[in-house]
Amino acid sequence: MDREQIVQQVRDALGDKIKRLHVANPRRVYVTVEPGDVVEATRILHKDLGARFNIASGMQTQTDFEVLYHFAFEEEAPNGVLVTVRVHLDHENPSVDSVVGSVPAARWIEQEMNELLGIEFRNHPEMKRLLLSEDWPKGVYPLRHGKPWEGKVEKKL
Amino acid sequence: MSNKAERTKSIVPIGPYHPLQEEPELFRLHVEGETVVDVDVDIGWNHRGIEKLAESRTWDQVPFLVERICGICSNSHPLAYVQAVEDCAGVEVPERALYIRTLVAELERLHSHLLWVGLAGHFLGYNTVFMWGWKYREPILDIFEELTGNRNHYAMMRPGGVRRDVDESLFPDIHRKLDEVWKQLELIAGAVTDDPVLHARLKGIGVLSREDAIAYSALGPTSRASGVPADIRRNHPYAAYDRLEWKVITTENGDVYDKAIVRVLESFETIKIIRQCLDRMPKGEIDAKMKEVPPGEGIGIAEAPRGEVFHYVRSDGTNSPIRHKVRAPTYMNLPTCKATVIGESITDATIILAAIDPCYCCTERLAVVDADTQKPLMTGKDLVRLSQEKTLRIRKELGL
Amino acid sequence: MGVTIKALSKSPWVFHVSSGSCNNCDIEILDCLCPRFDIERFGALLVGSVRHADALLVTGAMNRKSAIRVRELYQQAAKPCLVIAIGSCACGQTFFRESYNMVQPLDELLPPGAVTAYVPGCPPKPEAMIAGVVKALSVLNGGKKKGDGPKAEEPKKPAKPQKEG
């Protein structure tokens, strides 16, 4: 299968879940789905189509939060393609269903996005601190805009 | 957990300050007698907030930052990062720069695998292997110092190309040093394949099945040893890899023995790649001279010694990334310890965990933190000693 | 006291600890044990417990989760115990200083005067580390006092990228 065929396969499999599919270049595809469809969309890519889960990345934009789930289609070497599933979440209360049920390897990264960005992952099997120390105050999300920790975290031990 | 289980289980922490595993990390093994029944992994001991720091660095300052994510994969992170920027900007990198990138990346793989072989040797009680592995790293580090100016943290990558050209008058000497390393690798490969003690020690131990390797999204030699032929250099070609002849090394059994074999055999392939880079180094520019990064996003991936390194950048057209996501291979490989060490003996715990080749600083990570405050029975040092004693016992049993 | 210091300067037992490090300094410390540098022939030994240590080699930029343990380890070490900051991160945190997850630098984390020597570099070469440890030992041995001789270098800032080449 060449890269275009891989992309077509993704298009067909995700069907009407696709809000927008952007082929940035032959190796990079970005698919936007509704937050309600993210569990099924990631399951289709990972379980049905056999794509490897690379990682997820979250970010705060000027208007909302985005969570991106990155997958690698690589059985047809050297025609590897990275397909990213993107969801847009509410700026005030970013919340989405956890995909750990369909993508077990997403467990840690959802914990990380929760503690660094304050994104809620509903039904995550074990949401707890991953990177930050226990004395880091709740509600202070370092990866959000600006320096949210200023005045809230004692720098000196 | 029932009360009965609490009475029979004990907790054996490895780390956080184990002298032979330099980065602080904690695995907490729950043991019943001598068998590991559960493992907790706690990370956070090296978290330095690098993703946030990248947002206040310019695009060409970031390589200096991400280089310091990990000392052993010091080139892989900048390489993946600059590829992410080039992906975002749609920039084509000159051919000579692609070859220089490949050269540096493969030299790094070589010294990293030798480092691992040395550490593994120590855990098994083969201290001569430790000394040997690290002694033969030195010529590689010398090559780095001659080519790039530093033994580690080579600062060779920049978006659009490489920062420095390489001096071709050094190439004959590099070939000679590689000849020497090749000979030593042949010795070690022979030793690993012929030594019945190593077979007894490592075969069938810490098996990661193919299904688990896929479920955990394991990477690098950790997954290739389980029969998953994923190698970013082959599947998503970058730098000059698709212009050179080399093999992806995969084995089937997923045990510690296979993980060791994959790394040793990869080292031979690595030397072949380096030689081809030296012999075929094309003339020309080393830098596409990028002026700016347009708004957009990009992903760069590279095959570090431990597996895929993943960098994502988002640009709004200004001087700095507005988001930089970094994911090192050990982040995906570490959780596989749940599948590989549970059910095994504590005498094998250190070598099974080391077989992931954890680059903790990459993941910044791994500390297995346990909520209990139970008093430890043994330290990590005791576990290493147990591992070494097991090797001696097997040697006696085999009459060697 | 004289006997202890003399014994100390002859065969230092070192304990190595890292907090928020990229591991390069740590690898180069281990490299000192290996055949090319082989500090064991001088009697130097890497020990597994801080209670046996004469010198504490500290690397890393002091991150929140692990820095407290560096201080605890220092308190557990039998005095006199030299503390040697190995690498630019341990000397002054470099650009990690502004990170949200860093606490104060090593020489402010430990009691004043605890850090005997600073070996800057990223990473410092094994030769530099050995020179640093030897110099620190000579301080104890009644050689040059701290503050005599060349000042410890300011930790080097990472080089500004050049626009051309």
Image (tube, helix red, strand yellow):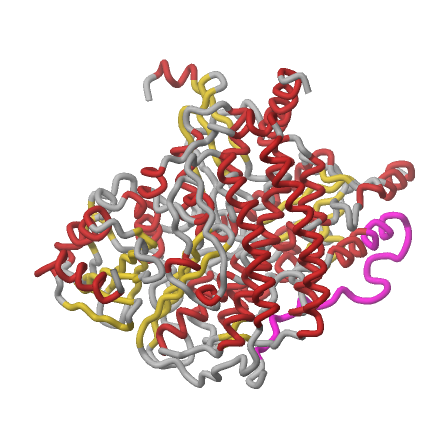
Residue A63: quadrant of the picture: bottom left
Residue B95 position (above or below residue A155): below
Q: How many marks?
A: 0
Asked whether residue A75 appears in the rendered view, the answer is: yes
Asked whether residue C61 appears in the rendered view, the answer is: no
Residue B385 position (above or below residue C120): above
Is residue B251 toward the left or the right of residue B151 in the image? left
Nearest the eye: A74 or C151 = A74
> The C terminus of chain B appears in which quarter of the rendering?
top right
Residue B224 position (above or below residue B176): above
Q: Residue at x 62, y 48 (%)?
A: B114
At which x and y percent is residue C155?
67, 66
> The N terminus of chain B appears in which quarter of the rendering?
top left
At which x and y percent is residue B137?
67, 52
Nearest the eye: B188 or B382 = B188
Q: Residue at x 59, y 41 (%)?
A: B21
Q: Is residue A70 magenta?
A: no
Q: Residue at x 57, y 50 (%)?
A: B267
At which x and y percent is residue C48?
67, 35
At which x and y percent is residue B66?
50, 64
Residue B193: quadrant of the picture: top right
Is residue C6 toward the left or the right of residue C153 in the image? right
Is residue B211 toward the left or the right of residue B395 in the image? left
The range drawn in magenta is: C134-161
Nearest the eye: B46 or B89 = B89
Most common secondary structure along the magenta stretch: loop
Q: Is residue C136 magenta?
A: yes
